[in-house]
């Protein structure tokens, strides 16, 4: 892993972040095809930056933070726009946002307690993020191409709710385990006063 800031994957992740306002603007204006195309480009860029980082060995410390941040920012912003436009219920946005805030708060707590090494993205969280991206892409495509399949929407909402719950539970378990190990290590260390 490199400590360089300027790598191709990092530039792609930053470009994805820069696209978010344009995607949100397109959704709020109901310019569905524009929103769909921009979102598709952003989604493809997510796979591309990971491929380049692995294949060309351009993984960086900054990239480990900016790539998931770009994904989270994209999903939250897009679902905020959907909720503002009445496409998804507000409670779904609150659920998605609350989970992400809880994960960040838990990671900060673990880092403050000296358990930073236990912080890692879980596979279920990656699946959850992928489903959110698929769902957002589906909603944009459905509006862009005027598809009306409410059962698909309900199924995807149910899947998002389920995966969000499972992911949140997995992070709580990791948080409790990480903090438990830290407390046990502190008890076992001699008093330095």
Image (cartoon, rainbow, N blue to C red):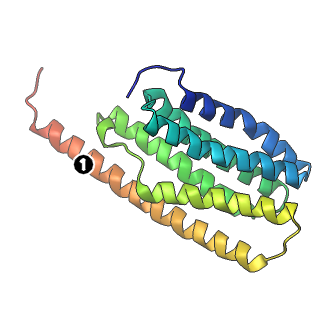
Going by the picture, which residue comes out furthest to the bottom? Answer: 151
The residue lying at 56 percent from left, 55 percent from top is 129
Check the image and report above or below for 55 versus 192.
below
Report x, y in % for residue 76: 67, 48
Using the image as rendered, state which of residue 90 and residue 50 is in the foreground: 50
In-image side of 34 versus 17 (left or right): right
Number of marks in the rendered image: 1
Q: Position of residue 93 (x, y in %)?
A: 68, 57
The quarter holding residue 32 reads: bottom right
Residue drawn at point x = 89 percent, y = 68 percent: 146
The percent position of residue 150, horizontal first and vertical second, equals 78, 77
Q: Residue at x 48, y 27 (%)?
A: 62
Give the quadrant of residue 142: bottom right
Residue 18: image location, x then y, percent: 72, 32
Residue positioned 71% across, 58% down in the render: 136
Mark 1 neighbour density, 10 Å: few (under 14) some (14–19) many (20 or more): few
**Location of mark 1 (residue):** 180
Q: Nearer the viewer, residue 81 or 112?
A: 81
Near-viewer residue (141 or 52): 52
Q: As drawn, is 128 to the left or to the right of 114?
A: right
Work out whether residue 133 or residue 185 is closer to the camera in this orientation and state it: 133
* Label 1: which secondary element: helix
* The C terminus lies in quadrant: top left
Q: Please state, as top left, top right, bottom left or bottom right, where the N terminus lies in the image.
A: top left
């Amino acid at each position: 892993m490199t400590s360089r800031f300027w790598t191709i994957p990092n530039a792609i992740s930053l470009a994805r972040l820069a696209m978010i306002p344009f995607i949100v603007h397109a959704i709020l204006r109901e310019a569905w095809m524009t929103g769909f195309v921009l979102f598709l480009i952003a989604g493809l860029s997510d796979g591309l930056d990971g491929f380049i980082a692995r294949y060309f060995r351009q993984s960086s410390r900054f990239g480990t933070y900016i790539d998931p941040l770009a994904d989270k920012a994209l999903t939250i912003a897009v679902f905020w726009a959907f909720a503002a436009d009445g496409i998804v219920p507000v409670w779904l946005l609150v659920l998605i946002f609350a989970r992400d805030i809880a994960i960040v708060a838990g990671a900060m707590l673990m880092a403050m307690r000296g358990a930073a090494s236990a912080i890692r993205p879980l596979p279920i969280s990656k699946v959850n993020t992928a489903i959110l991206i698929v769902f957002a892409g589906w909603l944009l495509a459905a509006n862009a191409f005027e598809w009306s399949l409410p059962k698909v929407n309900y199924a995807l909402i149910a899947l998002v709710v389920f995966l969000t719950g499972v992911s949140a539970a997995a992070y709580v378990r990791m948080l409790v385990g990480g903090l438990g190990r830290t407390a046990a290590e502190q008890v076992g260390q001699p008093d330095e006063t």
